[in-house]
Amino acid sequence: MKDLKSTRARTLRAKAPHTETRLWDLLRGRRLDGLKFRRQVAIGPYVADFVCLERRLIVEADGPLHDAEPDAVRDEWLERQGFRVLRLPNARINEQPELAMDDIRKALGQTPHTQRPLAE
C-alpha cells in the first residue's frame, strides 16, 4: 500500500497543475522564512499538496475540482493527526502570490511579510 501511495504522489508531482507549480516555486528550497516544505506528500490515506512537517502545516491549492464535503472529511482526519490545513484558492495564488505567502505565514503563526519591520 505504501508503494502505491508513493507512486501516486510521484505521479502527482510530475503532472502538477500550473497553480501548484507556481506555489512550489515560492516554497521550495526553504524560500519561505527558511522553512522546509515538501510537495505531494502521502499522509495516511491522503496526499497533501504541500506540507511543512516541522510546523505540521498542510497547504492545499484549491481549484475548481475540489468538493467541499470530501475535503471536510479529509481535513478533519488530517487535523486529528495533528496537522493544520490551509486551503488557498487558485486565484489567490495566481493573482496575489505575495498575499498567499502572507496567508501561509499567518497559518504558521508568523507575522506577515508586509507587516515586518525593516532591518536596520
Image (cartoon, rainbow, N blue to C red):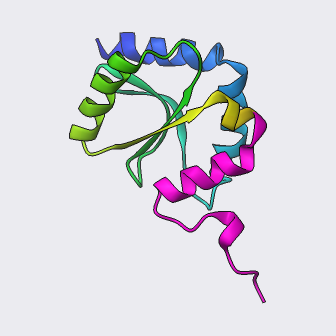
Q: What percent of the width, then of the height, locates residue 9?
A: 48, 18
Which quarter of the figure is the C terminus placed in? bottom right
Q: What percent of the width, then of the height, locates residue 10?
A: 53, 17
Task: Specify the farthest residue to the bottom.
Answer: 120
Which quarter of the figure is the N terminus placed in? top left
Location of residue 52 with respect to 60 vertically, above or below: below
Q: Is residue 118 left or right of residue 109?
A: right
Q: What percent of the width, then of the height, locates residue 33?
A: 62, 61
Q: Is residue 50 left or right of residue 81?
A: right
Location of residue 102 with respect to 110 vertically, above or below: above
Magenta-highlighted residues: 95-120
**Which residue is more in the foreground, 64 or 48?**
64
Q: Does 37 appear in magenta?
A: no
Q: Does 115 appear in magenta?
A: yes
Q: What percent of the width, then of the height, locates residue 77?
A: 24, 30
Q: Which residue is drawn at 26% across and 32% down?
A: 76
Location of residue 100 with respect to 45 vertically, above or below: below
Q: Is residue 53 left or right of residue 40?
A: left
Task: Specify the farthest residue to the left.
Answer: 80
Q: Which residue is drawn at 67% across and 71% down?
A: 115
